[in-house]
C-alpha cells in the first residue's frame, strides 16, 4: 500500500529536481542559443563568456535531470512506464540532443585550435541546445494535455498525436524562450566588469523576456482547447490569481532590474519567474502525474520503497548539497 | 527487423558503448590523483604535466560517459517499460544512490578540471580523491542493480504484482558482492592497461622520455595489481554462478548434459542444435574443480533447463572464453611485470615487454565487453531471472529498428570523433613535457 503523504512529498522532490534542472541545466541550453545568435563586434567575446560560464558546471547541472528520472521510476513506476511508452519519439530525440550538445561542447572546449573543425563543434553544440529544450518542452506539455494514455488504435494515434499538437508546440517554444531568457540574465552577471558585454546580454535578456511573456500568453490561449484541465487550473482556481500576480511581479521586477543594471537582482527575478511557471504547471495538474488517470496516489510504489528512498534522499542530500554549494562558491562567487 | 531484437540490439549497443566511458570514469580519476600526489611528494614537474594531460583526456571521455549514461537511464524505460514498472520500486534504491554518487563525481570533476588556479593544492588533490571515490561508488551501485536482475531478491510475487518489497535485501542480492568486485577490478585493469598500452607504444616509437616512463609506471601501478587479483575474483564469481545461476553456468561452459566430475572445455564451438561441442580442449574434472572446488562435484547441464529457456549457448560460451583468455593474458603479463619490478629492472628497458604491454592496451576493454555479453546474454530469455521474460518487458511501440539505427549511427559518429580528438589533442601533441 502506498503512503499518501510520503508520495506527495516525493513528488514534490521530483518537481524540485526538475525546477533545479530548468534553472541550471536549462540556462546551459540557453547559453547554446546565445552562442548561435552571437553577433556584432564582440561575437567571439560573447561565445567565450558563455563557454567560460558553462564549462565547470554543466555536467553537474545535467545530473538534476537524471535524478528526476530515477526518482520517477522508483517512486512512480507506472507513470514512468506510461511516459516512456507514449512519449518514446520525443524523448529519444531529446536524448540525441543531449548527447550532441554535451559531447560537442566538450569537444569544442578541448579542441584548442581555433579552426573550421572547432566551429563545426560549435554549430552542433548550439543547434542541439535549441532542439533539445523544444522537444523537452513538448514532452512536458504533452503530459498537461491529458492525452498520454495507454496506446490504442493507429501508430499516429498512440505514439504521435499525444505529443504533437498546437499546445505542445507552444510549450516547447515556451521552454526554449524561458531557457534563453534565464541564460541571458545570468550572463549579464557573469560579464562582471565588462560593461559592453553585460550590455549585449542585457539587451538580449530584455528581448527574451518579452518573447517569453508573449509565448506564455499564447500558450495559455491554446491551452483552452489543447489542455482544458491545465487551462481551468490556471484561470479559475483559487491559487490562479496569486500565481499570476507573482509571475507578473517577477517578470516586471526582472525587467526593471535589467533596466537599472541591477543584474544580481534580475537573476533572482528571472529564476523566480521560471520557477513560478513550472510550479504553476505542477499545481494545475496535481495530484495527477500523467493525466487523466495516473496520480501521485495510484501510481506510487509500495510504502517500504518510498520510505527507503526518503532515507536515501536525506543521506544523498547531506553529501550533495554541501558539494554543490562548494562548486558554485568556487566558480560563481565572483559572478 | 523484429521489435524485440531491435530493442535488445539498441540496449546492447548503448551498454557496450557506455561501459567503456563508465570504466574510464572509474579508472582515470585514480590515475590523475596518483600523478598529482606524486608531483606533490617529489616536486617533479613531469607528474604535474601528466596529471594535467590525463585530466584533459578524462574530461572528454567523462562527458561522453555522462551523456551516454543519461541515454541509458531513459532507455531502461523507453525500451523496457514493463521491466521498469515492475522493478522500479525494488531496485530504484541503487539507481538513486548511483544518481547521488554520479552527482558528486560530476561536481568534483568540475572542481578538479577547472579549479587548478582557484582552490588550494590540498583542496585540489582532495577533489580528485572525491572524484575517484564517487566514481567507484557509482559503478558499484549500478552493478548491484544489474546483479539483482541476475539473482532477484527482496520482494514477493502475489497475483503478478510485487509485494513485500525489501529494498535492502534487493540491494544486497546474492550476486551483488561478486559482480561489483569483478567489475571494479576490471575497471582498473582496463584503464590501467589502456593507458600503459598507449605510453608503451609511444615509448617504442620515439625516445624514452621521462614523461612516458612516468606515465607507464603509474598506469601499471593501477593495472597490474588489479589484473593479478582478477582471476581470484573470477573464481569467486564462477562458483557463485554455479550455485545461483546454473543455467548461465551451463551455457557459458557449454555443458549440455548434467555431469558428475565434469570436464572443462577450453575453446570449442558448441552446437546447441544437437548438443555437441566441436574442437574444444577437454580438461578432465576441470569444471567440477573450478565451479565447486571438488573434482567429483555434479554440475547441472542445460538438460536441466527447458529447451525454450536456453540462452544462446554459442555466443555465451565464446564470449566467456574470450573474457577468460584475455584476463589470463593480462594476469600473466602482470606477473612478469611485477617480477621485473621486484628485481628492480625498468619496464621500459625491455622492448619485448613494451610490445606486450602495447598489445595488452585494448585487452581489458575487450574482456569487459565479453564479460558483459556473458552476464547479459547468459541470462536470456529472462530480463529478471525466472521472474520476467525479456519479450514481456519490451515496449509496445512498433518500429524500434528506427531508433536502433539512429542511436547506432550517433554512437559510431561519437566514437570516431572521440578517437580522432584524443589523437589530435593528446597523442599527437608534442611530448615536449618538461623533462624533470
Image: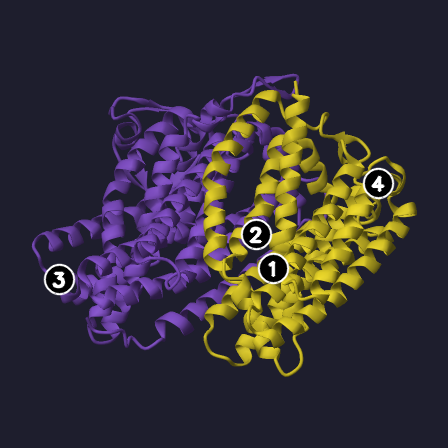
Chain colours: A yellow, B purple
**Badge 4: few (under 14), some or many (20 or more) residues near its Cα, within 10 Å?**
some
Residue topped by disc 2: A62
Q: Is disc 1 placed on a helix, strand or loop? A: helix
Say yes or no: labels 2 and 3 on the same chain: no
* Residue under the image location 10 percent in, 51 percent down: B342
Q: Quadrant of residue B51?
A: bottom left
Q: Is disc 2 placed on a helix, strand or loop? A: helix
**Picture disc at residue A28:** 1
> Residue most toward the bottom?
A41
Q: Quadrant of the C terminus of chain B?
A: bottom left
Say yes or no: labels 4 and 2 on the same chain: yes
2 or 3: mark nearer the eye: 2
Residue topped by disc 4: A240
Using the image as rendered, state which of residue A316 and residue B237 is in the foreground: A316
**Badge 2: few (under 14), some or many (20 or more) residues near its Cα, within 10 Å?**
many
Does B422 appear above or below B376?
Answer: below
Does A334 appear above or below B8?
Answer: below
Subunit that carries the residue with mark 4:
A
Residue topped by disc 3: B346
* C-alpha span from label 3 to label 1: 48 Å
Q: Is disc 3 placed on a helix, strand or loop? A: loop
* C-alpha span from label 2 to label 3: 44 Å
**Residue B159 on image: x %, y %:** 66, 17
* C-alpha span from label 3 to label 4: 75 Å
Q: Quadrant of residue A2?
A: top right
**Residue B382 on image: x %, y %:** 55, 32
4 or 2: mark nearer the eye: 4
Subunit that carries the residue with mark 1:
A
* Residue under the image location 62 percent in, 66 percent down: A188
**Picture disc at residue A72:** none
> Residue most toward the right?
A225
Amino acid at each position: 500500500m502506498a503512503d499518501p503523504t510520503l508520495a506527495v512529498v516525493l513528488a514534490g522532490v521530483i518537481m524540485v529536481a526538475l525546477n533545479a534542472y530548468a534553472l541550471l541545466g536549462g540556462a546551459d541550453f540557453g547559453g547554446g542559443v546565445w552562442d548561435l545568435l552571437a553577433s556584432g563586434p564582440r561575437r567571439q567575446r560573447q561565445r567565450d563568456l558563455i563557454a567560460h560560464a558553462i564549462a565547470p558546471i554543466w555536467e553537474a547541472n545535467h545530473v538534476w535531470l537524471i535524478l528526476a528520472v530515477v526518482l520517477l521510476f522508483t517512486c512512480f513506476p507506472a507513470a514512468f512506464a506510461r511516459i516512456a511508452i507514449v512519449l518514446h519519439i520525443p524523448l529519444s530525440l531529446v536524448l540525441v540532443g543531449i548527447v550532441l550538445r554535451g559531447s560537442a561542447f566538450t569537444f569544442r572546449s578541448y579542441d584548442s585550435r581555433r579552426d573550421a573543425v572547432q566551429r563545426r563543434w560549435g554549430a552542433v553544440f548550439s543547434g542541439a541546445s535549441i532542439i533539445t529544450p523544444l522537444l523537452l518542452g513538448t514532452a512536458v506539455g504533452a503530459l498537461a494535455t491529458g492525452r498520454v494514455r495507454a496506446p490504442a488504435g493507429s501508430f499516429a494515434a498512440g505514439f504521435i498525436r499525444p505529443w504533437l499538437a498546437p499546445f505542445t508546440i507552444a510549450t516547447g517554444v515556451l521552454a526554449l524562450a524561458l531557457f534563453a531568457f534565464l541564460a541571458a540574465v545570468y550572463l549579464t552577471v557573469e560579464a562582471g566588469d565588462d560593461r559592453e558585454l553585460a550590455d549585449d546580454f542585457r539587451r538580449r535578456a530584455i528581448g527574451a523576456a518579452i518573447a517569453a511573456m508573449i509565448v506564455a500568453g499564447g500558450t495559455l490561449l491554446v491551452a483552452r482547447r489543447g489542455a482544458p484541465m491545465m487551462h481551468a487550473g490556471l484561470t479559475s482556481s483559487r491559487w490562479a490569481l496569486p500565481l499570476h500576480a507573482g509571475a507578473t511581479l517577477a517578470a516586471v521586477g526582472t525587467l526593471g532590474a535589467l533596466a537599472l543594471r541591477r543584474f544580481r537582482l534580475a537573476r533572482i527575478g528571472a529564476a523566480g519567474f521560471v520557477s513560478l511557471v513550472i510550479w504553476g504547471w505542477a499545481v494545475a495538474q496535481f495530484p495527477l502525474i500523467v493525466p487523466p488517470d495516473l496520480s501521485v496516489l495510484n501510481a506510487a510504489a509500495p510504502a517500504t520503497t518510498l520510505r527507503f528512498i526518503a532515507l536515501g534522499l536525506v543521506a544523498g542530500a547531506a553529501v550533495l548539497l554541501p558539494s554543490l554549494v562548494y562548486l558554485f562558491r568556487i566558480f560563481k562567487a565572483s559572478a | 527487423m523484429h521489435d524485440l531484437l531491435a530493442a535488445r540490439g539498441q540496449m546492447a549497443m548503448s551498454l557496450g558503448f557506455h561501459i567503456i566511458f563508465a570504466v574510464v570514469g572509474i579508472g582515470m580519476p585514480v590515475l590523475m590523483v596518483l600523478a598529482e600526489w606524486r608531483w606533490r611528494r617529489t616536486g617533479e614537474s613531469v607528474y604535474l604535466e601528466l596529471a594535467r594531460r590525463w585530466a584533459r583526456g578524462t574530461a572528454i571521455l567523462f562527458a561522453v560517459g555522462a551523456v551516454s549514461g543519461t541515454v541509458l537511464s531513459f532507455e531502461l524505460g523507453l525500451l523496457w517499460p514493463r521491466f521498469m514498472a515492475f522493478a522500479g520500486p525494488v531496485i530504484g534504491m541503487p539507481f538513486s544512490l548511483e544518481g547521488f554518487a554520479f552527482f558528486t563525481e560530476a561536481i568534483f570533476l568540475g572542481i578538479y578540471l577547472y579549479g587548478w588556479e582557484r582552490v588550494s593544492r590540498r583542496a585540489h588533490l582532495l577533489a580528485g580523491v572525491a572524484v575517484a571515490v564517487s566514481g567507484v561508488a557509482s559503478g558499484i551501485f549500478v552493478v548491484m542493480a544489474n546483479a539483482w536482475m541476475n539473482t532477484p531478491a527482496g520482494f514477493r510475487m502475489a497475483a503478478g504484482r510485487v509485494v513485500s518489497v525489501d529494498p535492502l535485501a534487493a540491494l544486497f542480492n546474492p550476486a551483488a558482492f561478486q559482480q561489483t568486485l569483478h567489475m571494479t577490478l576490471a575497471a582498473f585493469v582496463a584503464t590501467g592497461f589502456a593507458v600503459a598500452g598507449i605510453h608503451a607504444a609511444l615509448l617504442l616509437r620515439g625516445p624514452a622520455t621521462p614523461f612516458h616512463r612516468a606515465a607507464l609506471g603509474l598506469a601499471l601501478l593501477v593495472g597490474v595489481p588489479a589484473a593479478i587479483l582478477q582471476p581470484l575474483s573470477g573464481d569467486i564469481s564462477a562458483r557463485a554462478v554455479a550455485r545461483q545461476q546454473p543455467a548461465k553456468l551451463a551455457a557459458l561452459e557449454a555443458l549440455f548434459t548434467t555431469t558428475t566430475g565434469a570436464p572443462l572445455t577450453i575453446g570449442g564451438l558448441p552446437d546447441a542444435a544437437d548438443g555437441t561441442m566441436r574442437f574444444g580442449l577437454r580438461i578432465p574434472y576441470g569444471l567440477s574443480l573450478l565451479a565447486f572446488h571438488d573434482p567429483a562435484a555434479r554440475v547441472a547441464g542445460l538438460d536441466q533447463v527447458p529447451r525454450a529457456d536456453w540462452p544462446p549457448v554459442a555466443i555465451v560460451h565464446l564470449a566467456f572464453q574470450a573474457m577468460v583468455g584475455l584476463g589470463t593474458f593480462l594476469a600473466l603479463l602482470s606477473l612478469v611485470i611485477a617480477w621485473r619490478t621486484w628485481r628492480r629492472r625498468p619496464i621500459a628497458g625491455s622492448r619485448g615487454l613494451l610490445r606486450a604491454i602495447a598489445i595488452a592496451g585494448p585487452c581489458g576493454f575487450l574482456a569487459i565487453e565479453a564479460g558483459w555479453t556473458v552476464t547479459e546474454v547468459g541470462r536470456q530469455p529472462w530480463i529478471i531471472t525466472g521472474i520476467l521474460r525479456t519479450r514481456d518487458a519490451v515496449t509496445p511501440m512498433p518500429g524500434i529498428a528506427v531508433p536502433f539505427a539512429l542511436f547506432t549511427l550517433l554512437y559510431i559518429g561519437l566514437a570516431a570523433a572521440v578517437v580522432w580528438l584524443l589523437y589530435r589533442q593528446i597523442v599527437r601533441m608534442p611530448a615536449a613535457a618538461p623533462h624533470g
